Image (tube, rainbow, N blue to C red):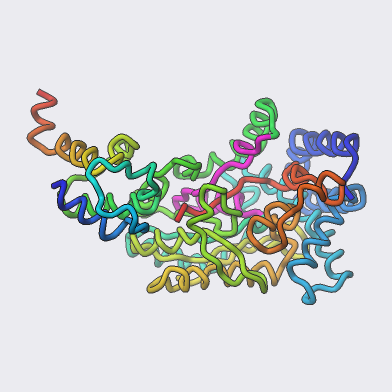
Amino acid sequence: MGDSFPEKVLRSMEAVTYWAAAAPVLARLPAALGYRIARWRGDWLYRRQAGKRTELARNLRLVLGSELSLAAAQEATREWFRLASCEVIDVMRLRRGTRPLRRLVKIRGKEHLEAALAQGTGAILCCAHFGSYNSAFSVLHAGGFPVTTIGRWQYKYTASLSSVERRFWDLVYARRVRRHRQRPNIEPWPGRFEVATLAARALRANEVVTISIDAPPLDSDRARTVEVPFLGRRARLLPGVVTLAQLTGAPVLMGFLYRSADYRHQVLEISAPVPTEGDTVTAFARCAAKVSAAIQKSPAHWAYWASTADLANLGLIPPVQESSLAAGLLPLPDQAYLPDRPAAAHAAAPG
Amino acid sequence: METVINDYISRELVQDPALLPLADETRLLESGILDSLSLLRLVVFLEARFGVPVGDADLLPENFASVHAICAYLRAREPGRQETAHG
């Protein structure tokens, strides 16, 4: 059952207050205390947001099925709310050259990235909307790796947002993240046919280009998707990361940021290069399998559980019926966006 | 130049056989022949084949709208032409 309109308004007000006022203060407290309070907020939201909680737990079980008991789905849902709250603190700790966040993030596999860049072909860091991925990119950049991200800022293309809301999200979120990038995001909007060429330029300049491959395809990109095994099902995803690697010779490394049990320390795991030779679909399936494994290992880290429409768009659950939405049987899609979780959609390069 | 580019696009980038034979005036973007990644393929080919580096600022739809447009763009980038253009 969806939340009522007044509940949605209250929720939005709470989120705005958290992002604009509370989180910046929490980010200046000792990390143990700041993240503990963020976790409490996550628990509070879990109790308060019945509609979103139900949607998340149901989506988890719909996709992961028998892998997840009801109790495990509820626990993963609670964890999702906690992580979402903590991710805001991560963004707020991206000050002073990201040092406050960097000292909480351990990077494993840095040598793979260094070896890739030593070849001079740049490196593609293949990721997902998983944990604090955007803050991870900033930490990486501030740590000496020139990072360019392919991805749309979600607040720019969510039709229901007003210009004031867009400006707000730019100020409290995008600006903080954007500061720690080699160049502005390469945003794959429909009709921006220069995206892959710009990404290739960044790779030729020996930069790290990040691509999240789990984004639901836009309608205009649907013809270019391929179907690959994903989360025990089959999903339609854009394989541009592999084509880009094949055309430029840049190696593809996988990167996932995991939050530890104390909620403040995190580990960015960077893999050795994934083979991208040969058939595009086969090579892309290897990347999708790595993303899938990361999500199955730690389901609460994945952003898309909160969006029934996005999961349907990926082909992981049946399409959402308009009649179901109208009858209030499913929460409206805006619940997925607003705005507990930092939400910059990173779509793969078209193709 | 037209023949070389037309051949490459016809052979490597056209997915729909109904679009062949490709006319030099065919709209490459509107017809879906060129997308983000196929443009990258084309740019790599043009730079290797004609030795003309394609700058970021030149990645404009009008420069890649058709085989004719691509040739016009490349001719304008030929060293002699640039010297003439810059006086």
Question: Is residue A29 among the parts visible in the rendering?
Answer: no
Please name the residue shown 41% across and 72% down the image. Answer: A279
Relative image position of residue A241 (x, y in whole percent):
46, 60
Q: Position of residue B4 (x, y in %)?
A: 16, 53
Q: Is residue A84 positioned above or below A251 on the image?
A: above
Image point (8%, 27%), residue name: B84
Residue A300 colored in magenta in the image:
no
Q: Position of residue A7 (x, y in %)?
A: 90, 38
Q: Considering depth in this image, is A254 or A216 the residue closer to the camera?
A: A216
Asked whether, in this view, residue A196 is left or right of residue A125, the answer is left
* Residue located 80% across and 67% down the image: A61
- Looking at the image, residue B84 sits to the left or right of residue A207; the answer is left
Which range of residues does the magenta coloring cover? A132-159
In the picture, the quarter occupied by the C terminus of chain A is bottom left
Asked where in the image residue A76 lies, by quadrant, the reply is bottom right
Please state if A12 lies on the left or on the right of A144 as rendered: right
Residue A146 picture location, percent across and down: 44, 50
